[in-house]
Amino acid sequence: MRQVDGGVHDNQGVGGLLEQGCTVLLVSDALGQAMLSVDPGGGVIAPLARSNSLLMERVRQEQFARLDAMDKGGLVKGLMILHLKRGLDVTPIDWKGCETEPDPDAEDDARKRKPVTGYGVRKEIQALLAGIRTDLDSFSDVEAFSLMTSGYRMAETYLSGVSVLPKASAPHAWPFLEIEKFIADANTTDASYRRAVKLLTGGRTRLFRVWGQSRALMLTVGLVVPLALAAAVVALSRHGLGGMSEGLVSITGWGALALVAVGVALAIPRVREPVSRIAIGLLGLVLWIPAWIHLGVFDRLFLRQGRLERILRGKS
């Protein structure tokens, strides 16, 4: 028997519920929704990945539109739909060269928008959570607690609208709610809030997250290491070293150049995604040593950067 992940067949699980004749539907959609991409990339890999994301997004929208129509038509007794973009504002974007005058009513609505969602999470934070990676890798305390707090407050708010369900008892003091003071009640100019935003901003990337959190590490890896390797190659080529063959010197030189080339490629948005995907494939196939080093060193640094205690102490 050959099977595929359920996300391919029924990513929200809605189809299975309707097939069984369920009339009270509580749908929690944690899908990483397709985000706006200013430069989606070209070539072969990027368009295919982007097309698949947009296709899944369209299927998701159609499923939710069907549920909404069933709810309005009285075909279900209760319906609650939660997703990571719930409560966020939708801002219309004109196409290039659009000559239509802006709608004054829409501009007034934009000025009246509140910075916090109806369930108490700041919209800036919720937008970052909507774009966070869905890969089941390492999540820091700030990332995990923010996701749990957002989902908990969202469910607490909208579950009360399903009248056929019993009312909830007294709220429980969950440990993850401690992050709420930084993602809901904090002043946006506070260092702790800006630190949480920085940590969550890096949450959408798959590789090299810790580099974006530590300037010292970024400077060391991006500048010092290539320069040191290049200087070593120049010194060895000029003066030589007993017992070291010319082949080893050549390999070291090419390695330094390759490292610099990868760094330059990752700095260019157009090639960043395909290079990242190729790197993921190589790490899974042959480069087990860098993967081992990453898990043993850099992943631990990433988790330490995102500890809640560091936010509490105001550390960067």
Image (spheres, helix red, strand yellow):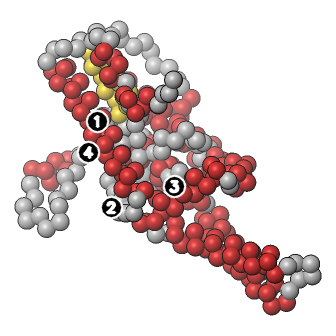
Disc 2 and disc 1: Cα gap in Å? Answer: 23 Å
Q: Which residue is mark 1?
A: 59
Please tell me whether mark 4 or mark 2 is closer to you in this view.
2
Q: Which residue is mark 4?
A: 89
Look at the numbered disc 4 and give the secondary structure of its residue.
loop
Q: Amino acid at mark 3?
A: Arg
Disc with the residue nearer the chain's start (4 vs 2): 2
Q: Are marks 4 and 2 in contact (CB under 8 Å)?
A: no
The answer to whether residue 195 is visible is no
Disc with the residue nearer the chain's start (2 vs 1): 2
Look at the numbered disc 3 and give the secondary structure of its residue.
helix
**Few, some or many residues within 10 Å of mark 3 (<14, 14–19, 20+):** some
Please tell me whether mark 4 or mark 3 is closer to you in this view.
3
**Few, some or many residues within 10 Å of mark 1 (<14, 14–19, 20+):** some
Q: Which residue is mark 3?
A: 277
Look at the numbered disc 1 and give the secondary structure of its residue.
helix
Closest to the observer, 123 or 5 = 5
| Residue furthest out toward the front | 1
Q: Are marks 4 and 1 in contact (CB under 8 Å)?
A: no
Q: Are marks 2 and 3 in contact (CB under 8 Å)?
A: no
Mark count: 4
Q: Position of residue 108 (x, y in %)?
A: 14, 51
Please tell me whether mark 2 or mark 1 is closer to you in this view.
1
Disc with the residue nearer the chain's start (4 vs 1): 1
Q: Residue at x 47, y 60 (%)?
A: 274
Q: Quadrant of the image for the C terminus? A: bottom right
Please tell me whether mark 4 or mark 1 is closer to you in this view.
1
Look at the numbered disc 2 and give the secondary structure of its residue.
loop
Q: Amino acid at mark 4?
A: Asp
Disc 4 and disc 1: Cα gap in Å? Answer: 22 Å
Q: Amino acid at mark 1?
A: Val
